[in-house]
Every structure is written in structure tokens, then in C-alpha cells.
Image: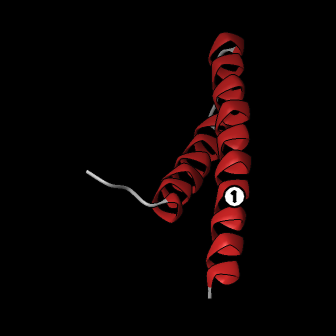
Amino acid sequence: MDVTVREHLRKLEQRLQLLSQEIMENRTRDERNKLEAEIRAVNLAITHYRTALELEEGLQTGIR
């Protein structure tokens, strides 16, 4: 199954919203630490995919 960069980015942004909501709930320190680590990982992935999308769009513009 082929998933576009935009689709990956959209799913990651949805995941980030969910994690942000979860961390606002009363949690133990360990649970918050795990959520914060996952939020950092998702943010890194979002940055990666945004960069890839910009590159992809730049290549498509250059081809035209």
C-alpha cells in the first residue's frame, strides 16, 4: 500500500493532538515522561515529513 507523504504527515499531526490531550489528564510522572518522549518523537517525525514534502514539491516544480 502506497501512502503519500501528506498522509503520513496528517496521521502524525493527529497523533500529536491525541498525545497532547492525553498529557493534560492527571497522570503519574512515569506516564507523563513516556507521553513526553512520544511527543518528542512525533515532532521529529513531523519535521522529517514536512522537509520531505517540501523537497517533493520542489522537485515537482522543477520538473514542470
Residue 22's spot in the image, x, y percent? 58, 38
Q: Secondary structure at mark 1?
A: helix
* Residue visible at 70% across and 46% down in the picture: 48
Q: How is the image coloured?
A: secondary structure
Name above or below for residue 24 compared with residue 35: below
Q: How many marks?
A: 1
Identify the image quadrant of residue 29.
top right
Outermost residue to the front? 63
Q: Is residue 33 left or right of residue 63?
A: right
Q: Residue 12's spot in the image, x, y percent?
A: 55, 49
Q: Residue at point 52% right, 64% down?
A: 6
Towards the viewer: 1 or 44: 1
Quadrant holding the C terminus: bottom right
Which residue is at 64% across, 39% downward?
A: 42
Residue in front for this viewpoint, 61 or 35: 61
- In which image quadrant can residue 19 be found? top right
Relative to 6, residue 19 above or below = above
Q: Residue furthest top?
A: 30
* Furthest residue in direction left, as rendered: 1
Up-down relation of residue 25 to residue 58 (above or below): above
User: x and y percent of residue 36 in the render?
Assistant: 72, 28
Give the residue displayed 73% in from the left and 56% down from the top. 51
Residue count near mark 1 (Cα–Cα under 10 Å), binned few <14, some 14–19, many ≥20: some
Going by the numbered disc 1, the residue's amino acid type is Arg
Residue picked out by circle 1? 50
| Residue 26 percent across, percent down from the top left | 64, 29
